[in-house]
Image (tube, coloured by chain):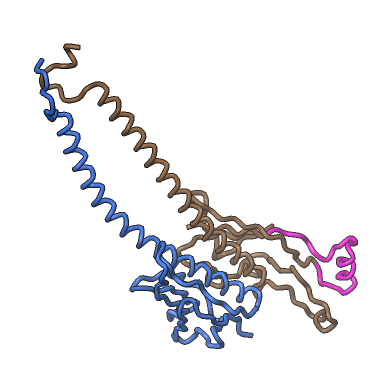
Chain colours: A blue, B brown
């Protein structure tokens, strides 16, 4: 057995430091990747929530024949204070009974498609004839069932 | 003690035990995070399914094909609430399309009621994971409705004009 001198660094501690360094380097890369993924998922979830809210209001207007003055939530990602630009779009995709509700922001989109919106009007505008009706998130508009 | 202090020995028993415990603790922590994330995700998916199912069930009962004709009642100031014609086969509820119920194409559905199934929403939910199931009670006209029957029903007397049925809407992905 070789005795250690005072102040000598042991192999154990050098190994531990090396392992810790590698671990933190990998953790840092993982965290960066995770942060970008979280931001993307958070944006997707925000868009899905708005989509679900618009969809629900539209379905209520259609089911009960009522007119709803609707204001959508604004799109915010994580803890950021500044809302992101996003748009709500009601579209006739061409085919029979082939309408959709889209939420778009920064080149990304969430949608519910193949739903019939023929008898729905947005601020009095019909969704028929391939003319999408688009409104920015956070602005008020009226969803109604045409008589 | 001699064995512990051998040359070339890198890890002490204490160190190995400590590492084992640390790995165990980290594993438990990661498992907790994963479980929490999964629970949140499941809740979000279930919420979406519930909303689609509730809207679809309301649309079934309010669809023009399934509404009870009001006939002379509206002229006399009466309105028949909660009445629908489920109908057999292709009439009533059976005739309503999935698109008309605002069920997006990424969702699967199964709509049934006492004595019938919808033709367009007839998927098999047996292998589905999360399912939203909504039941709504409705009244089905069992005979040609007369004003006297209507008043009898409104007064809570023996009401033979309607049969109480249940509509079940199941939605999953």
Could you say which is closer to the camera, residue B97 or residue B135?
A: B135
Seen from this angle, which residue lies furthest front? A6
Residue at image location 31% in from the left, 59% down from the top: A36
Q: Is residue B58 magenta?
A: no
Horizontal side of A113 relative to B57 (left or right) equals: left
Instruction: Indicate left or right for A137 with B71 as reference.
Output: left
- Residue at 15% in and 34% down: A14
**Between B64 and A32, the one nearer to me in the picture:** A32
Percent coordinates x, y for residue A97 in the rendering: 50, 77
How many labels were placed on the picture?
0
| Along the line of sight, the residue nearer the viewer: B57 or B33 | B33
- Residue A117 % position (x, y): 53, 78
**Viewport quadrant of the N terminus of chain A:** top left
Residue situated in front as seen by the camera: A11 or A101: A11
Outermost left residue: A2
Q: Residue B140, can we see it?
A: yes
- The quarter of the rendered structure image containing the C terminus of chain A is bottom right
Magenta stretch: residue B153 in it?
yes
In the picture shown, does residue A119 fall above or below B82? below
Residue B42 position in % (x across, y down): 48, 52
One can see residue B115 in this view:
no
* Image position, residue A76 (x, y; %): 43, 68
Q: Residue at x 10, y 23 (%)?
A: A5
What is the magenta range? B143-166
């Amino acid at each position: 057995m070789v005795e250690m001198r005072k102040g000598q660094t042991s192999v154990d501690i050098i190994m531990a430091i090396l392992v810790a360094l590698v671990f933190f380097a990998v953790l840092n890369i993982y965290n960066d990747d995770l942060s970008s993924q979280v931001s993307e998922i958070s944006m997707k979830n925000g868009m899905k929530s708005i989509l679900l809210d618009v969809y629900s209001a539209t379905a209520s207007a259609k089911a009960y024949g009522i007119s709803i003055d609707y204001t959508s939530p604004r799109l915010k990602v994580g803890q950021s204070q500044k809302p992101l630009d996003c748009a709500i779009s009601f579209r006739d995709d061409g085919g029979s009974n082939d309408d959709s509700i889209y939420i778009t922001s920064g080149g990304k989109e969430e949608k519910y498609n193949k739903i019939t919106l023929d008898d729905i009007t947005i601020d009095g505008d019909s969704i028929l004839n391939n003319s999408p009706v688009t409104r920015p998130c956070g602005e008020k508009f009226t969803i109604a069932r045409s008589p | 003690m001699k064995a512990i202090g051998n040359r070339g020995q890198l890890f002490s028993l204490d160190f190995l035990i400590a590492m084992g415990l640390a790995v165990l603790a980290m594993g438990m922590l990661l498992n907790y995070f994963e479980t929490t994330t999964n629970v949140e995700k499941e809740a979000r998916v279930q919420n979406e399914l519930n909303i689609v199912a509730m809207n679809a069930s309301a649309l079934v009962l309010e669809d023009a094909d399934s509404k009870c004709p009001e006939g002379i009642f509206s002229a006399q100031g009466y309105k028949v609430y909660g009445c629908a014609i489920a109908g057999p086969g292709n009439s009533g509820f059976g005739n309503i399309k999935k698109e008309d119920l605002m069920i997006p194409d990424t969702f699967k559905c199964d709509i049934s009621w006492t004595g019938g199934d919808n033709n367009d929403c007839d998927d098999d939910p047996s292998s589905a994971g999360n399912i939203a199931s909504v039941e709504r009670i409705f009244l089905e006209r069992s005979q040609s409705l007369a004003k006297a029957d209507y008043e009898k029903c409104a007064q809570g007397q023996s009401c033979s004009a309607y049969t109480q049925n249940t509509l079940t809407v199941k939605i999953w992905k």
